[in-house]
Amino acid sequence: MSNQVKRISQSRTYMTDLVFPPDTNHHNTIFGGKVMAYVDKIACIAAMRHCRKPVVTVSSDNFHFLAPIKTGEAINLEAYVTWSHKTSMEVFVRVESENLITSERKLTSSAYLTFIAVDEDGKPSPVPKVIPETEIERKQYEKAEERYQQRKHRRESYQVN
């Protein structure tokens, strides 16, 4: 097990992009799958910044679309590692829309994803522990073990005999 410890701020990652017509559906809002791809990509970057190793996506918790992101708006994403276990990391991602004319921002979705660090043989590899720094990070960190157990229970319930 890695005895290294890292602050959450060391994994914090931001991404902004402009939503163009080819990114959107017939409602002129970004495709949900495109948002999910952005979320997976930024979460992967945050996880790799935390452990400085290759990672693979293991799961994404419930993904809810709270508001649309329209053509011409910016999509803003923020991701950071909230907690780690032996070889796994939980990453929180927040997605907002931004009207670049009015500066209005809206929360459009958020999710927790789980990643496993892997070594050169593709085997799980130890990751550093996490130190929360802000009040929000501490709250996420305190609830992380419970989310981990819920994921573990869900994964076990999916096992086919």
Image (tube, rainbow, N blue to C red):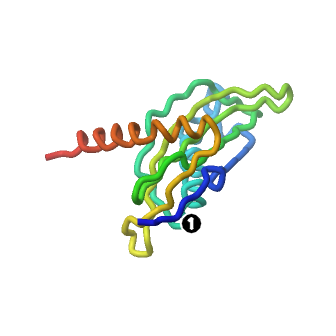
Q: Viewer-proximal residue, 54 or 35? A: 54
To which quarter of the image does residue 16 belong? top right
Q: Position of residue 17 (x, y in %)?
A: 73, 44
The N terminus is located in which quarter?
bottom left
The answer to whether residue 122 is above or below residue 15 is: below
Q: Position of residue 48 (x, y in %)?
A: 56, 60
Give the farthest residue toward the left: 161
Q: Viewer-proximal residue, 18 or 12? A: 12
Residue depicted at 75% across the width and 32% down the height: 98
Q: Position of residue 13 (x, y in %)?
A: 66, 50
- Indicate the amino acid at tag 1: Arg
Q: Check disc 1 and report its element: helix, strand or loop.
A: loop
Q: Is residue 10 left or right of residue 146?
A: right
Residue depicted at 21% across the width and 45% down the height: 159
Residue depicted at 62% across the width and 24% down the height: 67
The answer to whether residue 124 is above or below residue 99 is: below
Q: Is residue 107 left or right of residue 64?
A: right
Q: Position of residue 107 (x, y in %)?
A: 65, 28
Give the farthest residue toward the right: 101
Q: How many marks?
A: 1
To which quarter of the image does residue 133 belong? top right
Residue depicted at 45% across the width and 40% down the height: 144
Q: Dot 1, crowdedness within 10 Å: few (<14), some or many (≥20)?
A: some
The answer to whether residue 18 is above or below residue 70 is: below
Q: Which residue is mark 1?
A: 52
